Image (tube, rainbow, N blue to C red):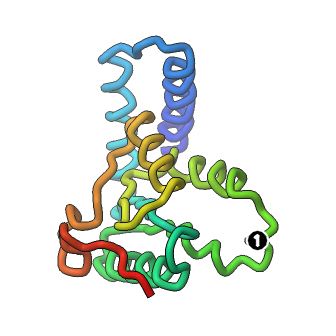
Amino acid sequence: MISSYKELSECQDRLLACYRTGSRPSDKFLARITQLRDAIQNGSKLTRVYVSGPITKGSRATNFHQAAKAQTILMESGKYAVLNPMLTMMHPDEPNISWERWLDTDLAWIEVADLVIRLPGESAGGDKETAYARQIGVPVAYAYEIPELREAFPAHYTTPTV
């Protein structure tokens, strides 16, 4: 399993180099990345999910509770290992760390995610996270597209204001 992680990491580095130089990776290379991701994911019964959504835009309390709700539902399903970056709001030095530094950290976690779930609400960071995920081949789904979240986050749902 460790060799699969190492090879996938090397492949992701090569993939990023392709995107940076504007070259297109071969279909065979992309298929190998998918094969490695599947092998690694099948080694664990949990899908690694990165929750993306608003933090600072709108009500921070509402944003926090929305993300916590999604995290709880996903974790209780027994199918997902959830990384909820909205928890960083509680970090004692959160106001002293730049938005760009937080985003850099978030993007590094997205690189090892199996899925990014985008919560409702306007978010420049969320938009950057989902664009990056798509760029590196990590699937992105809206909360209402995930069966476990559909009831809590219907397609017409918008982040309420407080």
Q: Position of residue 24 (x, y in %)?
A: 40, 14
Q: Position of residue 122 (x, y in %)?
A: 43, 62
Residue at (31, 26) in percent of width and height: 31
Determine which quarter of the picture holds residue 142. bottom left
Residue at (81, 67) in percent of width and height: 96
Residue at (56, 53) in percent of width and height: 109
Above or below, 152 relative to 98? below
Neighbour tally class for label 1: few under 14, some 14-19, many 20 plus, Cα within 10 Å: few
Residue at (69, 51) in percent of width and height: 100
Whether residue 17 is visible, yes or no, is yes
Compared across the picture, whether 132 is left or right of 105 comes to: left
Q: Position of residue 57 (x, y in %)?
A: 53, 68
Above or below, 119 relative to 111? below
Compared across the picture, whether 146 is left or right of 65 comes to: left
Q: Which residue is mark 1?
A: 95
Between 80 and 36, which is closer to the camera in this rendering?
A: 80
